[in-house]
Amino acid sequence: METRPTIMLSRKGVAWWRSGHPWIYRDDLLPGQTASPGEIVGVQDNHGRFLGQAFYSATSRLALRFLTTAAEPIDAAFWEARLQQALAYRRRVVHDSTAYRLIYAEADGFPGLIVDNYDGHLVMQVHHAGFSRCLPELLPLCHRLLPVKSITLRNDSEVRRLEGLPLEVQTIFGSVPENLTIQEGPLQFRVDLLKGQKTGLFLDQRENRQAAAAWAQGEVLDCFSYQGGFALHAARGARRVTAVEASAFSLQMAQENARLNGLDNIDWVQTNCFDFLKSAVNAGRQYDLIILDPPAFAKSRADRPAAVKGYRDLNRRAFQLLRPGGVLVTNSCSYNLPLNAFLDLLRQAAQEAHRSARLIECRGAARDHPALLALPESAYLKCVLAMVSSGSQVP
């Protein structure tokens, strides 16, 4: 193994390292230590004992992202073994879809790197300077192990600012079709890899979209519809779907997706979802299935009180709008709002709506987004299915 700069942890940092969490914060380093941005460093405890190797950040509060606890070379062979493992896992868990997450950062042993595969068009998000330095080793491996049609860097996430990295979007290999179409179960979706949210589509909800569709009947309401993922799947079993989305661009994409699949039983509404729900309650509307998939309300711990209020208000109105026997599919992608807290606010929302509800299922992200047990931040998505009981009016 080549000689690398060494970073030593404080006693508190060593205790955190023993928990298995792959991140070490700057406050947990012994003072006066530094390395180049994104450099791979050796990590030692406060007595000089070897603990592993990690990417170093020169600017972020998150100072170290562990790569391995072994004294092994980190070279092309190292990355090839991890990419092979990631590919083998996706071959086991991805079915009936031509779009999936190929690399999920720390959960696949690639700290700070996201790679989504849209039918051979790879979209990468590099959140850390370390992988900006390692891409020359990784890209040839992708070409060798995958049928790559294009590679696009969607480096426009705000988290890059914490690492002192520029925001940019660029295609570095091949070309991206203007109307790229992918398959998701029985449906097709057009995606925009250059301007769409995340890497083009919310792939983490792929399995939840199909799980929600199993409950679709009668009148369905889909709020925060984005490009129509939940709405289109639900429309195959519903009499009528109302899809609400504030973004004109997203709504246009959703309507194109509906036409692509020959679905004409969807009413598209461009407005604020909070306003729509409030008006629907006042109008006495009723639905058999309601889907809520809002953006993250709690991006930090400081946001949590306001986020809880926002989620509770949304879900209270949804419970009010459900017919007896109706199903609520409600989501939160806020890591700072854990599942137990989400379930608690749903209980409060049902109580405030004077509804009795049964918990059907708690789901997470699709299986191509495996959560690392030692990194609870990777288990961010919560998808809860609840049914309003018949005769559910309660005090």
Image (tube, rainbow, N blue to C red):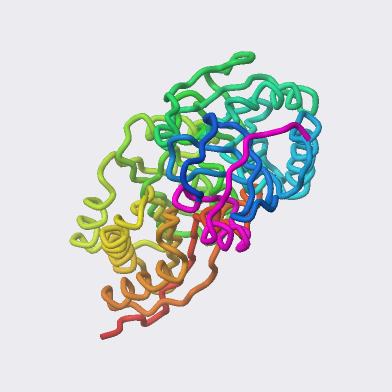
* In-front residue for pair 139/73: 73
322 sits left or right of 112 in the view: left
Is any atom of residue 373 visible in this view? no
Residue 163, image x, y percentages: 45, 34
Give the residue at x 41% y 74%.
Answer: 388
Residue 150, image x, y percentages: 64, 19
Quadrant of the drawing holding the C terminus? bottom left
Q: Is residue 19 magenta?
A: yes
Give the residue at x 32% y 31%.
Answer: 248
Q: Quadrant of residue 313?
A: bottom left
Quadrant of the drawing holding the N terminus? top right
* In-front residue for pair 395/133: 133
Residue 9, image x, y percentages: 56, 52
75 sits left or right of 11 in the view: right
Q: Which residues are magenta?
A: 1-28
Give the residue at x 41% y 49%.
Answer: 241
Whether residue 27 is situated above or below residue 392 in the rendered picture: above
Whether residue 237 is situated above or below residue 180 in the rendered picture: below
Residue 89, image x, y percentages: 76, 47
* In-front residue for pair 163/301: 163
Give the residue at x 78% y 33%.
Answer: 80
Q: Quadrant of residue 214?
A: bottom right
Q: Which residue of the protein is positioned furthest toward the bottom in this rendering?
A: 395
Q: Quadrant of residue 371?
A: bottom right
Is any atom of residue 239 visible in this view? yes
Q: Total number of numbered labels?
A: 0
202 sits left or right of 139 in the view: left
